[in-house]
Amino acid sequence: MDLRHSLPRLAFQAGRLTEGTRMLPEETAVAISYNGTTQAVMMATPADLEDFALGFSLTEGIAAPDEIDSITAVETDRGIDLQIWLVGPAGDRLAARRRSMAGPVGCGLCGIDSLDEALRAVPPVPPSGLALTAAQVMAAIAALPGHQPLHDATRAVHAAAFWRPGQGIIAAREDVGRHNALDKLAGALVCGGAGMVRASTHPTGSDEPARRGGSPAVGCVLARTEPSTVYPKAHDGAIILTSRVSIDMVQKCARIGAAVVIAVSAPTAHAVRMADAAGISLIGLARPDGFEVFTHPSRISTQEAAHVA
């Protein structure tokens, strides 16, 4: 499926109209289904969808990696159905908190059916010896544009990336929705971790439901691990976001154990309070020449050396 299209447009510049074309990103309806029942429908960029399915499951607290049996992407004429089969207690937990979400572009709290669910607390991120210098924070944000090819072409998508000291940006994902981009990054970090193997892709144009026990997951096959409320895949580096940071973005970052979150925009006041409670160093308004630290500033040093325990 194409990720972008060149469409005609009229441009008004210097007091005159000119005809031309503009490259625009595609978006498609993506349904996320668990054990045969649709849980959420998002408008998303049709790329890295296996990462999206896995990351959404983790950051929404629906399932730990060991509770996902398979992920299959089924393309139809109306969109894409990400069919996820759960094992263990995850299915029972999901039934207890069942909700239906439908959002224009990856809404983080769309369809939440209770205030408690919307404001759910997250456990503190695992202890981390991570410390970054101011120079490293600015270098991380300066490196992000080099990992945004779809944004370069369209100027219309968000990105989420993971930066690690000594390695730079090791993973980045783009999407028309900021929550989607973060979910895709979370899935990519898990897919790149120990206990994961890559499976061959099985594209299909059928809208016939996938059968449990059939083809392996498209993209990732999950090894059995010990379940954890927080899956600490982001404790030794910084998550970088091109968007503002709202409470739901902090919740998602906490689920993958993020020690540091760097965003180009400002956070909301509630996001700052939640990041503080979760033990996350939240950095906003980040530019290659400066930034503002809102929580846990002890991880950020003005010294020229950083240390990761």
Image (tube, rainbow, N blue to C red):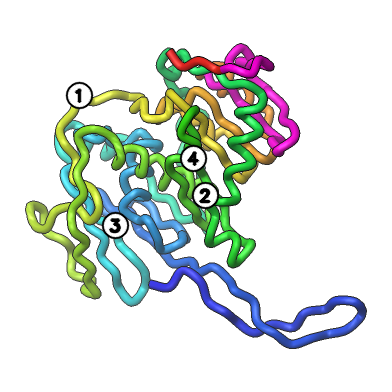
Q: Which mark is residue 82?
A: 3
Q: Quadrant of the C terminus?
A: top left
Answer few, some or many: residues within 10 Å of disc 3's Cα (few below 14, many 20 plus, some between 14 and 19): many
Q: Is residue 49 shown left or right of residue 248?
A: left
Q: Quadrant of the N terminus?
A: bottom left
Counting residues from the start of the chain, the first of labels 1 and 4 encountered is 4
User: Compared to 67, does 294 lie above or below?
Assistant: above
At label 3, the amino acid type is Leu
Question: Which numbered mark, 2 or 1, is in the foreground of this view?
Answer: 1
Question: Which numbered mark, 2 or 4, is in the foreground of this view?
Answer: 4
Counting residues from the start of the chain, the first of labels 2 and 4 encountered is 2
Q: Secondary structure at mark 1?
A: loop
Counting residues from the start of the chain, the first of labels 2 and 1 encountered is 2
Region rendered in magenta: 279-305
Residue that label 4 marks? 169
* Residue 150 vs residue 250, the one in the foreground: 150
At label 4, the amino acid type is Ile
Q: Secondary structure at mark 2?
A: loop
Q: How many marks?
A: 4
Q: CA distance from mark 2 to mark 1?
A: 30 Å
Q: Is residue 60 shown left or right of residue 17?
A: left
Assess whether mark 2 and mark 3 are in contact (beta carbons under 8 angstroms): no
Residue that label 1 marks? 226
Which residue, as the protein is rendered here, is positioned at the far right? 15
Counting residues from the start of the chain, the first of labels 3 and 4 encountered is 3
Residue that label 2 marks? 107
Which quarter of the picture shows residue 228? top left
Residue at the (45%, 23%) spot, across then down:
122
Q: CA distance from mark 2 to mark 4?
A: 26 Å
